[in-house]
Amino acid sequence: MEDRDEETLAKIIDKKIHLNMVIDKDEVYWEQRARANWLQFGDRNTAYFHKCATTRKRANFINKLSLDDGREITDDLSLKEEAKTYFENLFSSKGVANPSKVLEGIKRSISYEMNEGLQSPFREEEVRTALNGMGPTKAPGLDGFPALFFQKYWHIVGKEVLENFEWRGRVEATNMTVIVLIPKVQKPTTLVNFRPISLCTSAFVPGRLISDNVLLAYEILHMFRLKRTRRKGYMAVKLDMSKAYDRVEWDFLKDVIIKMGFAMNWVELIMKCISTASYAIILNGSRGRTFKPSRGLRQGNPLSPFLFLICSEGLSALMRSAKQNGLVKGARASRRGPEISHLLFADDCMLFGEATENRARILKSILQEYERCSGQCVNCGKSTIFYSSNTNEESKLAVSTLLGVRCSSSLEKYLGLSNIVGRRKKEAF
C-alpha cells in the first residue's frame, strides 16, 4: 500500500472531525427527544434513546377527541380548533363578585423597604444568575434558541437581553406562549384529561420547600388518631382546586396585591406581565391559532406560584376572620399548641375544624365566597376528608354529604409522608 501523503491525511482528519460533530449533534437531538435527564455526556446514542423518544411521542399523540354531543373528531384541523375553543373558554373571565368581604381580612404586610427593593433597577448579575439557573437544553423560545445559546454567548447578546428588562419595555413579544398538553390518564379522549403546560421563555424556581407545612399536617393527623374519648370529633379536608392556575381572576388578584401594600408601579408591572400573555396550542407537533386570555396564570412561569399564593391569601383572610368571630375552630398538633385552621401546599389546601354539620356549613359558605371572588372552584371528586378517631358515624355522614367530598382513612400518601409514618410506627413499638 502506498504511503498516504499529507494532503490525503489532512482530508481524512477533516472528515473525521466533521463526522464527530454530526454524531455529537445527533446525540444531543435524541437526548432532547428522549427527555432522559439522567443522561451523561459520552453515553452512546443507542436504540434505547430512540425507543424512549418513540414511546413518549406515542403516549402524547392525540388521535381523536370525543365531544360533548357524542361526536368524535380525528382530522388535524378540527382537533386544533377544538383545543383552541376549549382553552380559550377556560382562560376567559367569568366575572367576580364584590371582594370587599375578602379584602377586610387582609392586612398590609409589605414595608417601604420591600417596595424599594422590588422597584430597584435590574442588575446584570441578577439576570445572569437567573439565566444560569435554567436547564440548558430545556424548551427553547419561539425563536428556536434554548437557554444554552444565551448562556454560552452572553458576551454577544447580553446587552440586548438586558434592554428587555426596562420598566416600560414591550413584554408582549416575550409573553407569547405555546401550550403543550400532558395526558393525565392513559389514552385520553377528552381535553379535560390533559394538563396544559406553558412553555414560557423563563425558568422554574428550584429549591422551594413546603416541608414545614407537611410535617405540621402530619402531626395534626397523628393527634386525630389519638383522639378516642373526647366528645367532639375533628376533620381535615384536603381541597383540590379544579384548574387552579387557569381560573385565577386577574381583577381579584390585583385587589389583593394592592391591599397587601405593594407599590402601584410594581403592581402595574406585574399586571402587565400577566395581561399581555397570549397562547397557542401545540397539538401533535404543530401549533394552532393564537388567542388572548382574560384570566389565569401560566403553569411553567416561575412567577405564577408566588402570584397564586397571593391569590390564596383571600381564602386565608376568610378563614382568619371566621376564626376570630368564633365561627371556625381549628385543630391543635398538641394540647398547648396554637389552633391551625388551614395550611397551604402550593395550589392545594388543607382545612381543619370540628366535625359538626354547623361547622361544615360555615366552611362551605367560605369556599363559595372565595370562589365567587377569585374564580377558584373546588373539585369535590378529587377532594377528601379525614376524621379523628372519636368522630361518630352520624357526624361523618352529615359532614361528608354537606361538603360533597369522599371520606379517606389516610392522607399520608397525598402528603408524601409514607416514610415518616413508617418511622413513627416503629418508634411506637
Image (cartoon, rainbow, N blue to C red):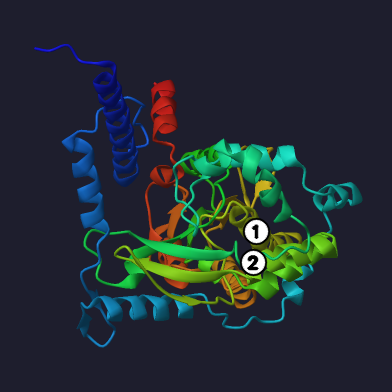
Residue 34 visible in image: yes
Quadrant in the picture for residue 23: top left
Residue 282 location in percent, x, y?
A: 38, 66
Residue 209 visible in image: no
Residue at the outermost right position: 112
The C terminus: image quadrant = top left
The three-letter code of the residue at mark 2 reads: Ile
Dot 1 surroundings within 10 Å: few (below 14), some, or many (20 or more)? Answer: some
Q: Which residue is mark 1?
A: 307
Residue at the outermost left position: 1
Assign a secondary structure to mark 2: helix
The three-letter code of the residue at mark 1 reads: Leu
User: Cα distance, mark 1 to mark 2?
Assistant: 10 Å
The N terminus: image quadrant = top left
Asked whether disc 1 touches disc 2, contact meaning CB atoms under 8 Å apart, the reply is: yes
Assign a secondary structure to mark 1: helix
Q: Is residue 199 above or below residue 374?
A: above
Residue 261 location in percent, x, y?
A: 84, 60
Q: Residue at x 59, y 37 (%)?
A: 132
Q: Is residue 73 above or below residue 173?
A: below
Dot 2 surroundings within 10 Å: few (below 14), some, or many (20 or more)? Answer: many
Q: Residue at x 77, y 57 (%)?
A: 166
Residue 351 location in percent, x, y?
A: 56, 56
Residue 136 location in percent, x, y?
A: 48, 39
Q: Point out which mark residue 274 bears.
A: 2
Earlier sequence position, callout 1 versus callout 2: 2
Q: Nearer the viewer, mark 1 or mark 2?
A: 2
| Number of numbered discs visible in the structure rendering | 2
